[in-house]
Image (cartoon, helix red, strand yellow):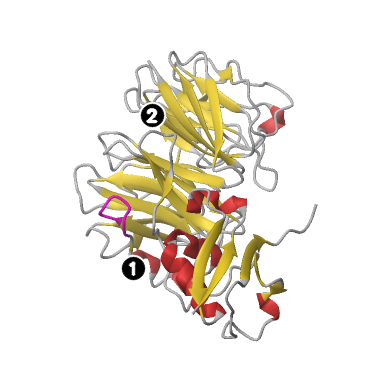
Amino acid sequence: MSVRLLVGTGKGGFWVTSDDRRAWKVAGPFFKGWKVTAGVRLADGRFMAAVASDIYGPALHVSADGEEWEQLPSGPAYAGGGDRRLREIWTLRENRGVIYAGVQDAGLFTSSDGGASWAAVTALNEHASREAWMPGAGGLCCHALLFDETNPERMWCGISAVGVFRTDDGGATWTPKNHGVPAALEDKRHKGIGTCVHGLAQDPGHPDRIFRQDHLGMFRSGDGAENWERNEQGLDVSFGFPIVIDRASRYLFAVPLEADQYRVPLGGALQVYRSTDGGDSWRSASAGLPAADAYGTVLRGAMAVDNLEPGGVYFGTTSGTLHASADLGESWTNLPAILPRILHVSAWDGS
Amino acid sequence: MAAVTVTLPSLLDPATGGVREMPASGDTLREVFADLIEREPRLKPHLFNEAGELRRHVLCFHNGTNTRWLDGWDGAVAEGDTVLFMQAVSGG
């Protein structure tokens, strides 16, 4: 049961591989000196990675084998003339043959030709409420994308610190869907935004069941984000960034942090919380993780599941430590590597 | 049309495949930049912003002179001139 992790850091990308999910090999860095901010494995088998530099900006690279990478000739880009800049690509997803890139400054771009050309999703990027969009601490970024496997016209995106938007017409129009989540910063004119979504997860097979790690707590929706309710039972603290779900078990995983100026594990104990009942309750599932003196933050893109059975769960910290569980969080292995600040983790089967 | 030599920093290896010196030609610096981007389009988003200006922390020297000190990019270039790109380095 082999697994390949793409670990994106502030100083390059690393492949972390295992044939048994117990013993791990680390290879890299590639894109040395660049931030690796997102990754996806495309349906055609290619890897796609987003990189960024504070000096030289962002780019997309593709690789057939994970060894030789080639920068795409073009990538998502805002038109010139305004003050909007494409600073980083925060998330990459593929759905029904279309590649989606969520970016900072916040926006969404699509490619229908394998990344050769990109188009802006204008109805979202130029949304009427945009004048009131405010950045979070990580910037104004579109970082989470969910799709409806039963309805090709519907998808969701999460923008910090704006909230969740949904389209029901294939991207022609977008509506904020944040009812029930308190606003972090309420706008005088534009209502329904100003919420700070940090991470989204979706129940496999039930696309309208969505789980949300928000700046102001843990929430879930059973109706496609029309309404949100808190589901924090068992959480000592409810601030955090990532939330992921295992496909087979539907177990949820999150890493609560002490809110919100501090943003590190409560009391220095690095803990993963798991919900085995669809978010009704949460319990620590942290055996093997550092129980003291651990103050690394887990960023929104730095946690992933491999969707093998039993499910593997992986996350990295801003301190550069990487942690793996091959048994749905029952036990954890702390990988013997100290990487640069970890921004992104993706997991795929096969090494 | 003058042929010039453009030197690129190692950090841009992923965009150029490791090529750090490229030929480009033009009668002005603006034309040289345009020719450079035509030869290697992958450099465009790394050197220039959406407004077509040099990225804020990208330095460009024409024959050793910071192009930000020039009165625009329309001055003449000559055969054998050099253009050097590098990143601004500060802090520590």
Foreground pick, A186 / A166: A166
- The mark nearer the N terminus, 1 or 2, is 1
Residue A344 drawn in magenta: no
Quarter-of-image position of residue A286: top right
Q: Nearer the viewer, mark 1 or mark 2?
A: 2
Looking at the magenta stretch, what is its main secondary structure? Answer: loop
Foreground pick, A152 / A103: A103
Amino acid type of the residue that numbered disc 1 sits on in the rendered structure: Thr
Say above or below: A190 vs B12.
Answer: below
Q: Which residues are magenta?
A: A111-117
- In the rendered image, which residue does mark 2 sit on? A348
Please give left or right for residue A59 compared with residue A149 in the image: right
Foreground pick, A191 / A76: A76
Percent x, y of residue A202? 35, 39
Disc 1 residue crowd, few under 14, some 14–19, many 20+, Cα 10 Å: some
Percent x, y of residue B39? 43, 64
Residue A113 drawn in magenta: yes
- In the rendered image, which residue does mark 1 sit on? A122
Task: Give the Cα separation between the discs numbered 1 and 2.
Answer: 32 Å
Q: Residue at x 59, y 80 (%)?
A: B77
